[in-house]
């Protein structure tokens, strides 16, 4: 049995016009330490998959097993990096991470240890210079760094990232991708990342899960990305294997799963 | 008749001339460029003194309101001279103001106290009614914001009662409490409670789902969610409601006291009207305005202190 098992998940939303089937038979098995990217056109239900794993949304049928235990409510063992950072604006950068540390390690760590652990995680994302700033005073990229630090600080079994860099400009996005690769190399987290960026998916992940269009979206194809780590964006730009993977994903997205409205 | 025709014809004539002017223009431009001094290698601007800029800003801030003030004084004097001399001149009013503020806290009996006492008594009533409204309004607003059922149950009542002038409640207060002071406080309570309820419940409803998702991932308990998410997230809305209700409460107390009597700035105005001391009334109007500004600034300070958006 794999580490994280998304087992034949259906998600159906009741609407005024009857049931809307968002996901049908989504099945995915993820090993410990794997970095998985889920890619698909917007509206295909990528985020729905992540929300089911996070426990924020209940599957209508099927379910999620983490270490053979069923997931049915949210918890810090499946920390989420939200698309729009979701930092609490009345707390400082430090406090935003500390609230998570206190909640998760309130019993197991001393106060001093929790302080050190908070700082450690903020250093990991290079945000130790802005501890006392509030989210309103830092840039979008910095906010997302803090969001990542908060998630990492929970020491999750699975790190869930919901289009974490979608709202950022290209250069900031690249910086943060480097940071994520760096952290991933150091901590070997199990990561499930939602993205709509082909380069991001190929650069970061071990496997790319390509989803078909909704309604009743499901896993279309899974592409194993067999590129050595550490990966370098510049070197890979001319790498034929990298470009092959890239083309594979593009072909899936733009030939086999053309957006209906774009067609 | 012929003149009108000539006027009607005039525009086309101008239009005909216009192109001629255009033809001449390029020549003039060319002449200008010839006369221009050769471009300097780097742009140089005359240095702008910061002190001078600041001084200009201050002068503007004083001169413009000052001009309006003078205009008001002129209208005032005009009313005094042309319409009714019952309105005292600015000079007479100023003299009365000096007299009033010379002894703001004298006590010459229960019905004859300095204007300072009048204001303090009114403020006391406002604060009592306001505090009660906050104490009741915030929890009610929270419940209305958090529970759809409570919202559905209370919303129509709030909507019906909100537009009612709070003074309409005065007779009810007098009946129930059989005393002037509690009735005035009751009116202030009614005045203040609607903005607090409406803004608090709107604030709770406006909390982004993301914050609640963060709370769920962290497995915060109900109490923790209230303390660490709901209260800080709604505080800006609550403070807005409080600021609105306090300024309206200060307006309403004047009217309420006119009706209830007793020590207070509202009754002071009414009393001076009965004595035909119009100068005192004008002084009181100015004072009521100043106190209103002070209350407003205090609320702004509080808002700046507690509102994460403004810090």
Image: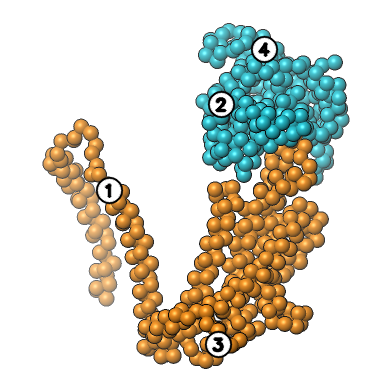
Alpha carbons under labels 4 and 3: distance apart: 93 Å
SS for tag 4?
loop
Classify mark 3: helix, strand or loop.
Answer: loop
The hue used for chain A is cyan
Q: How far apart, in angstroms, are the residues tagged by discs 1 and 2?
A: 41 Å
Do marks 3 and 2 share a subunit?
no
> Chain for mark 3?
B
Q: How far apart, in angstroms, are the residues tagged by discs 4 and 2? A: 28 Å
Q: Which residue is mark 2?
A: A126
In 3D space, how far apart are the residues under numbered discs 4 and 1 (Cα atoms)?
63 Å
Q: Which mark is residue B49?
A: 1
Please give the residue where the numbered disc 4 appears in the rendered image.
A225
At 38% from the left and 70% from the top, the residue drawn is B68
Tags 1 and 2 on a common chain:
no
Identified at 72% across, 70% down, the residue is B161
User: What is the CA distance from the residue labelled 3 to the residue labelled 1?
Assistant: 57 Å
Q: What residue does disc 3 label?
A: B108
The answer to whether marks 4 and 2 mark residues whose Cβ atoms lie closer than 8 Å is: no
Depth check: give the residue in front, B109 or A70.
Answer: B109
Q: Earlier in the sequence, mark 3 or mark 1?
A: 1
Chain designation of label 4: A
The picture places residue A127, in percent across and down from the top left corner, at: 56, 29
Q: How many marks?
A: 4
């Amino acid at each position: 049995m794999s580490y994280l098992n998304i087992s034949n998940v259906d998600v159906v939303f009741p609407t005024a016009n009857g049931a809307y089937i968002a996901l049908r038979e989504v099945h995915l098995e993820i090993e410990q330490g794997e970095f998985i990217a889920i890619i698909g056109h917007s509206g295909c239900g990528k985020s729905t998959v992540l929300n089911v794993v996070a426990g924020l949304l209940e599957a209508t049928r099927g379910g999620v097993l983490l270490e053979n235990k069923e997931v049915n409510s949210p918890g810090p063992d499946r920390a989420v990096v939200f698309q729009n950072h979701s930092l609490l604006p009345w707390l400082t950068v430090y406090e935003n991470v500390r609230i998570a540390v206190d909640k998760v390690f309130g019993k197991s760590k001393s106060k001093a240890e929790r302080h050190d652990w908070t700082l450690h995680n903020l250093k990991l994302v290079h945000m130790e210079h802005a501890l006392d700033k509030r989210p309103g005073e830092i840039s979008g990229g910095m906010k997302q760094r803090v969001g990542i630090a908060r998630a990492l600080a929970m020491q999750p079994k699975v790190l869930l990232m919901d289009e974490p860099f979608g709202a950022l400009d290209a250069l900031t996005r690249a910086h943060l991708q480097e940071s994520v690769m760096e952290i991933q190399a150091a901590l070997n987290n199990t990561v499930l990342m939602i993205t709509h960026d082909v380069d991001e998916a190929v650069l970061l992940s071990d496997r790319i899960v390509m989803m078909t269009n909704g309604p009743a979206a499901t896993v279309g194809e899974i592409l194993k990305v067999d590129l050595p780590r550490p990966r370098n964006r510049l070197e890979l730009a001319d790498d034929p294997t990298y470009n092959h993977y890239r083309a594979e994903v593009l072909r899936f997205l733009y030939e086999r799963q053309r957006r209906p409205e774009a067609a | 008749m012929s003149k009108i025709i000539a006027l009607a014809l005039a525009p086309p004539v101008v239009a005909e001339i216009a192109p001629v002017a255009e033809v001449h223009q390029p020549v003039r431009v060319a002449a200008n460029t010839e006369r221009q001094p050769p471009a300097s290698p780097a742009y140089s601007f005359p240095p702008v003194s910061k002190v001078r800029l600041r001084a200009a800003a201050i002068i503007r801030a004083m001169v413009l309101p000052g001009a309006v003030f003078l205009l008001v004084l002129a209208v005032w004097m005009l009313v005094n001279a042309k319409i009714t001399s019952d309105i005292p001149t600015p000079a007479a009013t100023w003299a009365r103001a000096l007299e009033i503020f010379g002894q703001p806290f004298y006590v010459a009996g229960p019905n004859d106290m300095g204007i300072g006492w009048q204001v303090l008594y009114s403020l006391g009533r406002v604060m009592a009614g306001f505090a009660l409204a906050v104490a009741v309004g915030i929890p009610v607003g929270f419940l209305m914001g958090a529970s759809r059922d409570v919202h559905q149950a209370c919303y129509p009542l709030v909507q019906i009662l909100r537009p009612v002038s709070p003074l309409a409640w005065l007779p009810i207060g007098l009946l129930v409490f059989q005393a002037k002071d509690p009735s005035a406080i009751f009116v202030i309570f009614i005045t203040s409670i609607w903005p607090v309820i409406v803004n608090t419940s709107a604030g709770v409803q406006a909390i982004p789902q993301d914050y609640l998702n963060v709370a769920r991932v962290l497995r915060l308990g109900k109490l923790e969610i209230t303390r660490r998410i709901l209260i800080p997230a709604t505080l800006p809305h609550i403070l807005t409601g409080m600021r609105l209700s306090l300024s309206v409460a200060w307006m309403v107390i004047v009217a309420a006291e006119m009706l209830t009597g007793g020590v207070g700035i509202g009754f002071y105005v009414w009393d001076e009207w009965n004595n035909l001391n119009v100068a005192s009334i004008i002084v009181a109007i100015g004072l009521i305005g100043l106190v209103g500004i002070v209350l407003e600034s205090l609320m702004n300070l509080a808002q700046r202190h507690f509102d994460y958006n403004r810090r």
